[in-house]
Image (tube, grey):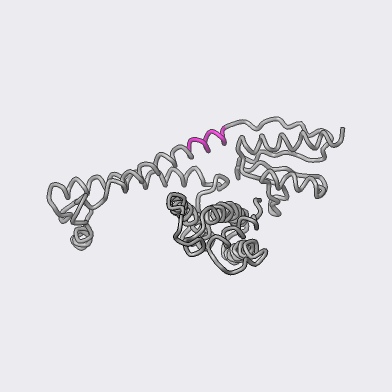
Amino acid sequence: MEQINEELARRAKDANSFSEYVEGSATAGYNASCAEARRIAEERKKEVPEERWAELDRLVERYCAKLASWTNRNNANEGSCPSIMICGGGNFPVRKKQKQNARRDTLMREYNEISEILDKIKSYGVGGFPILSGDADAIERLKQKISDAEKAQETMKLRNAYYRKHKTLKGCEGVSDSLAAELDAAIPTTFEKVPYASWELSNNNANIKRVKERLAKLEREKSTEAGEWNTEGLALTVVENKEIMRLQVVFEDKPSAEVRDLLKGAAFHWSPSQNAWQRQLTNNARYALENILKKLKGSIE
């Protein structure tokens, strides 16, 4: 995982403040944020089944990795041009400051996206779980999700067409008078005068396409025959577990710290319930494991 660059943090502080930079404060702040994310995840684990814990851990890892990268890039930007308070008005680099401000806007949007990962951790399992490829009913749930989204698309189109013709939703099929009054009142008086804006239909349509692609990929993966793995002399077994969609490595004995580090570096996680090191079953996972096996074989030859 990327480390916090203290030098960039110091430059950012010097460019925007008269106070001294406290050595290690950027790293400490980052560590505190990650510790809080882990604490929240551990709290959520008390409310969700054990088989969902690995997904929570992955969310925390993704949050921390993205936050570290963002912190360094944000500090680099903040240190790229001093504030007018620091350098004064004479010969102030206006164009450089404009470029910095534009970059700030982009970085703020990225930060909001990172914050959404933390929100997912906080609400994980509330109102149901995300559909994971390893869920036994993943295919059925994805099909239902597509069906629901397609029905919603048709409903939005039907109501928009009815409103354009009648200037109200009262009398529209499937819409009660009370709901019609509520929807009519919410329609904006400018721009698109319809119950559902074009972006809502576009977003829903894009979501349908995305879920269909995911369904097709999962169906292909489940129907693909397991590959042959040469593990001779390694005291381990490779299992392509199609039931939970995991590529698993089962060792005869506890692997060494070096082997565990190899697995962790390739995004494999220890699963006590499966008694195996595993990650989601994909071609990328297969490729990563092939490289690990080559390294292990090389170490014993």
Which residue occupies the extreme bottom position in the image? 19
- Residue 287 visible in the picture: yes
Q: Is residue 227 magenta?
A: no
- Residue 46 visible in the picture: no
Question: Where residue 282 sits in the image (x, y, percent)?
Answer: 60, 38
Question: Where residue 167 sits in the image (x, y, percent)?
Answer: 13, 52
Question: Where residue 47 sits in the image (x, y, percent)?
Answer: 57, 65
Q: Residue at x 17, y 50 (%)?
A: 163
Q: Is residue 89 left or right of residue 73?
A: left
Q: Quadrant of residue 22?
A: bottom right
Q: Residue at x 50, y 49 (%)?
A: 131
Q: Is residue 253 left or right of residue 142?
A: right
Q: Which residues are magenta?
A: 215-223
Q: Is residue 183 left or right of residue 54?
A: left
Please tell me which residue lies in front, 237 or 185.
Answer: 185
Please tell me which residue lies in front, 230 or 205.
Answer: 205
Which residue occupies the extreme front position in the image? 90
Which residue occupies the extreme right position in the image? 301
Q: Residue at x 54, y 66 (%)?
A: 17
Question: Where residue 224 sits in the image (x, y, percent)?
Answer: 59, 31
Characterize the magenta stretch by its predominant secondary structure.
helix
